[in-house]
Image: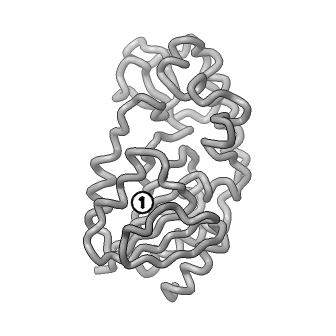
Amino acid sequence: MKPRLVVLTGAGISAESGLRTFRDTDGLWEGYDIYEVASPIGWNKNPALVLDFYNMRRRDVRTALPNAAHKGLARLEEKYEVCIITQNIDDLHERGGSSNVLHLHGEIFKMRSERDPRFTYPVEGDIQLGDTASDGGQLRPHIVWFGEEVPMIPRAASEMARADIFVLVGTSLNVYPAAGLIDYLKEGVPKYIIDKKIPPVNHHSQLHLIEQPATTGVAALLELLNV
């Protein structure tokens, strides 16, 4: 049995592939007010704007490439049973070679009915107003917006509780409930924290702090773990 290694990743790992982070300065994302394009209120107010925004994000992700950090985390599977828990909606972990990825906040290449999230479908192109699911509901991005439940949190918490080693890459631990997942780790689990600016984790034990961008930080991690 390989040791279980759980990784929690955030926008910092995708930023090095050219994808803008979800929370840039002044609460904007690609120049848009976050709540206009990432909340049920924004969707009800102007669904066409929201669809256009995520259609653009889908095109951006399609042209982005996994970087050395994504590929490095995939290499961990040589030695460990790895679960990647990501707050990112892109598919760069999968394209980087990771085989077990849990998306907390949804996936840009999926869409679902606005009426019932169980009606979910793959999507490669654009979603338009008037495109409907089999239940008749308008199709929307399969993204968890502000003010919505995060349905993958219980599964993520279960993965964290079973971890023998924990790695955090490129996240500020400011967004809840994802930020609270670290509290599910067992006592004494080694924690490798990789970020350009180390988030507030000093109240935890067994810390290995790697204050670097994701690409060089993951390379340092692989050396530390002899992978």
In the rendered image of this protein, does residue 164 appear above or below residue 172?
below
Quarter in which the N terminus is drawn: bottom left
Neighbour class for label 1 at 10 Å: few (<14), some, many (≥20)?
some
Where is 90 relative to 147, above or below?
below
Q: Residue furthest front?
A: 203
125 displayed left or right of 186: right
Name the element at disc 1: loop
- Determine whether, in the image, residue 43 is placed left or right of residue 3: right
Q: Nearer the viewer, residue 210 or 158?
A: 210
Q: Which residue shows up at 71% across the image and 41% down it?
A: 60
Residue 81 appears in the picture as rendered: no
Q: Which residue position holds label 1? A: 100
**Residue at image point 59% right, 54% down:** 92
Q: Position of residue 170 (x, y in %)?
A: 57, 60
x and y percent of residue 226 in the render? 51, 88
Q: Residue at x 71, y 35 (%)?
A: 30
| Visual colour scheme | one colour
